Structures are given as C-alpha cells and as structure tokens.
Amino acid sequence: MKGHWSLRGQLSVVLGGLALAILGSVGGYLGSLATDELFAAQQAVVRSTAQSAAELLASQLRDREREIELLSLSPHLMQGPLDSAAVRDSLDRRAALHDEFAWLGVTDTEGKVLQATSGMLAGRSVAQRDWFIAARERVYVGDVHEAKLLATMLPSQPSGEPTRFIDFAAPIRDADGRLRGVVGAHAHWRWITGLVDGVTRRQGASSSIDALILDREGRVLYPELLKVAQAEGQPVLPTALVNGRFEGALRFGDGRDYLTSEALLHARTNAELGWRIVARQPLEVALRPVHDLRRELLLLGVFVAAALTLACLMLARRVSRPVEELARIARRVEAEREVPEFPREPAFRELTQLSDSMRSMAQSLIETEHVLQKTNATLESQVQERTAELQAANAALEHLATRDPLTGLHNRRSLDARLDEALALDRRYAVQSGRVHGLLLIDVDHFKHINDAHGHPAGDAVLRQLAQLLLSTLRVSDLAARFGGEEFAVLLPELAGAVDAIAAAEKIRQTVEAARFGAVGRVTVSVGVSLVSPDDGDVRPLVDRADAALYEAKRSGRNTVVLKTAEPGLPPR
Ligand SMILES: Nc1nc2c(ncn2[C@@H]2O[C@H](COP(=O)(O)OP(=O)(O)OP(=O)(O)O)[C@@H](O)[C@H]2O)c(=O)[nH]1
C-alpha cells in the first residue's frame, strides 16, 4: 500500500484544489474587471478636474479682463483729470474689492503713472512695459511674469517664491475715441494658482490629485518646484505631454506613474494665453481601491478555500470512513475466519450495497472453506488408512519374498544376501576385531524314512518343529534359514573362533536330540560347521566347507557336529 494516496487524501486534494482554482479564476477576473472600471472612473475624475480648472481659470481671467475694460470706460476716467483723487479712490475701491489685484494704476499716453493704488509707482514711467505698449491699442491680458518695480514695494511671498503677476490693461479714450491714457492692473499669480488648487482640493485630499499649468510652449508655470526643476534642465514632464494633448497613464520626471488628463484653457477673449491645465493623480493612489479590493478578494478567497477544503475533508472522511471500516472488517474476516457485523451506511446507497455484497461474499467464502476443511480431514484419514494398508501389504510381500512358507524361517534367497553382507563385514573388520561369522548346515537324519513311515504331512510337521527349536536355541542376532528340503542353515555373527561355532552347533544338536516330535518320536540332526576365511573370494567356499563338514558328519554316523576349516586358513581354536 506504500506509495499510494488514500482515498481521503486524494478527494481532499482534488476538491480543495478545484475550489482554489475556481476562486482564483473568479477573483482574478473580478479584480481585472474592477481595475478596468476603476481606471476609467478615476480617469474621468482627473479629466473633470483638469477641465473644471481650465474652465474656472478661463472665466476668472475673462471677468478680470472685463473688469479692467469697464474701468477704462468709467466716466471719471473718460472725462476728468486722470490724476484726480476720484480716480485714485476708484482704483483703491476696486483693489479692495478684488484682493487678487496687487496694483491698479492709470498712466498718461506716454507711460507715466498718474494715479495708483496706495500711490505705488506714482510718477514713474512704465512706457517700456508690454502691457502699456499693448494697451495703447486694445484691451490686454499678459502672460505671467516676475514683478519688477513693485517687487521691492510689496510684501514678499510667504513661500519665498518671487512675486509674479498677470497683467490686465485697457486704453482710456475720451468720447471721441482719442487716447487719454492706459489703465493697468497686476493680479497676483498666486490668485491663479489658488484657483487651480481650489479645484483640485475639491476632489479631497486623499485623492492626491494635483494640477500643473503649462504655457503654450509646454513650459511649466506652476507648481514652482517643477518650474524650477525644468529651468535647471531636469526632465520633468513626459514627452507625450510636451508634444501634445494626452490622456492616460504617464511616467513623470520623478519616476512615478500618474493618471493624467490635460485641458486647454480657452478664454474666448483677448486673454488667449494658450495655457494648458494638466491634472494628474499618482497611479498607485488611483488604483488603491483596486489593490484593497484585490487584497480583500484574496483574503476572502483564502477563507473560502479553507472552508471549502475543510468541507471537502469532512466529505472525504464521510466517504472514506466506511470504506476503511470495510477494509478493516475484510482483514478481520481473513484473520479470524468469522463474519462480524458489517456497517450499514444509509447516506451512501452504493456503500450499503458494497457492504451487503461483502458480507454475503465473506459468508459464502467461510462456508466454502469449512466444507474444504472437512473434505481435507476426510481425505487425510483416508490417505493414512491407505498408507497403513500399503505398508502392511509391503511388509507381507517382504515376508513372502524372504521367508520360507512352511517353516517361517528366512529362505535361501534371504540367506544368500545375508551371507554376502557377512563376508563383506568380515573382510573389513575381522582383522581388527578378531571376530568372524560362522555358518552351520543342519540336515535331518534319515528324513526319507520319516516321510515314508509317517507320511509327508508328518514330515512337514517335523520340519516346522525343528524350525521353532532352532529359533529358541539361537540368539536374536543369529539368522536361521531353510537351506532346502530337510536342510537348515544358521549364520552366526561375532564369533571369537571355531569353538563358539561348534558350541552353538552342539547346542542345536542336543536340543533336537532331546526333543519329542509327536508320533515320529525322536529326531536327530547332523551339523556341518565352517567359518569365514580371509581367503574366501565369495560365499561359495564358505558354503562348500560347511557342506563338506555336513557330509563328513553324515559319513561318520550322523547326530554329530563336524568343523571344516579353510586350507590354508585359520587353524581351529
Ligand atoms: N515331508 C517332507 N519331505 C521332504 C521335504 N523336502 C525333502 N523331503 C524328503 O526328504 C528326504 C531326503 O532324503 P535323503 O536325501 O535320502 O536323506 P535322508 O533320508 O535324510 O538320509 P540321510 O540324510 O543320509 O540321513 C526325501 O525323501 C525327500 O522327499 C519336505 O519339504 N517335506
């Protein structure tokens, strides 16, 4: 199971990942939609600021222009002496009414100041001034310029900036249209900048919108800081702005991106100064709500994803728990070979079906296993029985193959095999141990007569009794066999010498002689004895020596024991 993910883990990862992917896509889409919308909305605000400032300036410049024109048309300027106190009163009143005017004055046709507010510049010549020269012909509005003569007479700017003016001027003519003089006014530049700032302030401090005033050549007139920087040769404005009108995001000389909009100041009077008002808002401030929205969306997304992942985990647990329970029960069935209680899960029909199927399968398997176990047990006992029978049959066969049917002693074939073994053992060990095998050939004396006198069955009975007598006389390690007809053989192991063999033969002879054989009565046997010799190539010489000894015993009168040793061989001891 190693290396495989659990069902619960896989479900959690897949469902949680799916939820995250969906939330990420929706959040990304909403964020980009909001960015576009907000960009357009903020652009509209910046544009409206630029246009409002341009329109306000245009109308204010037009109003001041008309003011001066109307002043030039007033009766006490057209008719009376221009240096009268009435003229000065009129100038002072207007200056008091419009505090943007720093100076109001009247000159004669040569440019000599006849009357002025607070008497400033009275008697001085302004013949070289643009406003005087232009206003001899027509109503004049001049571009901003630094104060010259008045600079020392007026209080200096609180900001430390040089005093600047916008000039308004108009010709003074009599009823016949002859030039009598010129009326001129210097309006404070800060009046203009104050108007522009007033418009941007209306957007609220947090909007960070500011406005620039550019002249028709694209030079900065306001704010002062940028004007100075530009004069020093620093790149202040984006190229797009210098070259023409523009709206959109621009990077300014300070390295920041601004949402920018530009409006042409159009006064529709002589005051066509060609100024442009540029309103701008730092892009990061403009898009801050989008960033806030994105952050909130991200937070919401993380929260929802966490909640969804938790829900997925719970769902996965709900699905996997019964499956794990089924797996546990399956292991129990395998280990205990019993059918425990299977869970039923009503929430999932498929799991209920699976549980039912597993229960019936487990029952069927265990029943089949019980049947198989019983069959196995029966088969095993049958195999054991058959094996025992086979072993018994094999033993019987073995007995039949090695035993003489009449006497139950070993037969000739079995004796020959044991004689071969005896010879091999003696060849290997006899020299060290000094012990050899001996062979007795035992023949019933006058057996033909027994048969003839008592019948063949009686002869068989004698042979069987002789066999029992042999077995009772011999040791367990000795081997008695029927050699053929009425002749028996005995193989004696571990003999110290011929004396042992003769003793055994004699014991047999005497036992037979002492026994009674039913109706037959007494029976005697003759015994030929021989010992294994180191010179024996096979068993033949051993048997031949025993047979010769038996012949010798018969010839010497029967019921006796004769030893026949090998020539040359071991001397009889
Ligand atoms: N009843 C019976 N007689 C057997 C069996 N095998 C051999 N005989 C008989 O044993 C007799 C052996 O006789 P002989 O070989 O002449 O020897 P014997 O009469 O014992 O005389 P000696 O050995 O010289 O003492 C024969 O008559 C065989 O028929 C047998 O299994 N059962």
Image (cartoon, helix red, strand yellow):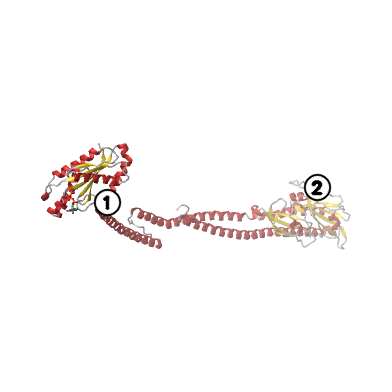
- Horizontal and vertical percent position of residue 92: 78, 52
* Residue that lies at the very extreme toward the front in this rendered image: 555
Residue 362 falls in image quadrant: bottom left
Instruction: Using residue 26 as the reference point, say whether residue 197 is left or right of it.
Output: right
Residue 26 falls in image quadrant: bottom right
Reading the image, the residue beneath label 1 is: 413
N-terminal label among 1 and 2? 2
549, 509: nearer the viewer? 549
Name the residue at 16% across, 43% down.
511
Seen in the picture, residue 392 relative to 433 is either above or below; the reply is below
Instruction: Using residue 511 as the reference point, say whether residue 170 is left or right of it.
Output: right
Specify whether residue 35 is in view.
Answer: yes
Say what secondary structure mark 1 lies in.
helix
Seen in the picture, residue 556 relative to 137 is either above or below; the reply is above
Instruction: Using residue 205 as the reference point, say whether residue 478 is left or right of it.
Output: left
Mark 2 crowdedness (10 Å alpha carbons): few <14, some 14-19, many ≥20? few
**Numbered mark located on residue 365 in the image:** none
Say what secondary structure mark 2 lies in.
helix
* Residue that lies at the very extreme toward the left in this rendered image: 519
Whether label 1 touches label 2, CB < 8 Å: no
**Residue type of the residue flagged with mark 2:** Ala
**Residue type of the residue flagged with mark 1:** Arg
Reading the image, the residue beneath label 2 is: 151
- Horizontal and vertical percent position of residue 4: 47, 54
Which circle, 1 or 2, is nearer the viewer? 1
44, 248: nearer the viewer? 248
